[in-house]
Image (cartoon, helix red, strand yellow):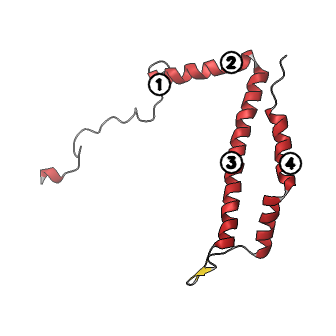
């Protein structure tokens, strides 16, 4: 019966005050490494703020392009599904978009204006930073 008892029952309660506590600076190698890296990044940004701002916009643009490509891929996948997929499987309707919805997807996918807008914006964002 003694083996069925809960741990620490009737005994001393363990000290849990250290859980969630922030270690003092310099006490952890990981904490020191992160602080040194952030300090180096801040120093680099202060030395050449225009280049750092341009680099940050470049990184954000690349992320936005990847996200846009993912969305475009999903639109193409849905369009292909509605083009060649089954209409229904038993009682479940597998095509959920109306003809108007499909037409608007087609207009967006195959219009040159959308691509021209993206490319025009990319030319401005991706040009090299001016040296001052």
Q: Secondary structure at mark 2?
A: helix
- Label 1 vs label 4: CA separation? 46 Å
Contact, CB < 8 Å: mark 3 with mark 4? no
Mark 3 vs mark 4: which is more N-terminal? 3
Q: Is 90 situated left or right of 1 in this image?
A: right
Q: Which percent across, then down, holds residue 82? A: 68, 71
Give the residue at mark 4.
116
Q: Is residue 86 above or below residue 52?
A: below
Mark 3 vs mark 1: which is more N-terminal? 1
Mark toward the viewer: 1 or 4? 4
Write the residue at 81% across / 59% down: 110
In the picture, residue 49 is in which quadrant?
A: top right
Q: Which percent across, then down, holds residue 60? A: 72, 37
Q: Is residue 58 above or below residue 92?
A: above
Give the residue at mark 1.
30
- Farthest-out residue, front: 84
Residue 67's disc number: 3
- Label 2 vs label 1: CA separation? 21 Å
| Quadrant of the snapshot with the C terminus | top right
Number of residues whose C-alpha sits closer than 10 Å to that of mark 3, classed few (under 14), some (14–19) or many (20 or more)? few
Q: Is 63 situated left or right of 131 in this image?
A: left
- Label 3 vs label 2: CA separation? 28 Å
Give the residue at mark 2.
44
Q: Secondary structure at mark 1?
A: helix
Mark toward the viewer: 2 or 1? 2
């Amino acid at each position: 019966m003694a083996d069925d008892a809960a741990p620490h029952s009737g005994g001393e309660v363990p000290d849990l005050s250290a859980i969630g506590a922030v270690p003092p600076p310099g006490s952890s190698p990981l904490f020191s490494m992160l602080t040194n890296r952030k300090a180096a990044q801040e120093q680099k940004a202060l030395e050449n703020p225009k280049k750092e701002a341009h680099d940050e916009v470049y990184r954000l643009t690349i992320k936005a392009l990847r996200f846009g490509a993912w969305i475009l891929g999903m639109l193409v996948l849905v369009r292909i599904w509605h083009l060649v997929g089954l209409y229904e499987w038993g009682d479940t309707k597998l095509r959920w978009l109306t003809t108007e919805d499909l037409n608007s997807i087609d207009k967006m996918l195959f219009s040159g204006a959308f691509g021209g807008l993206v490319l025009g914006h990319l030319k401005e964002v991706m040009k090299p930073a001016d040296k001052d």
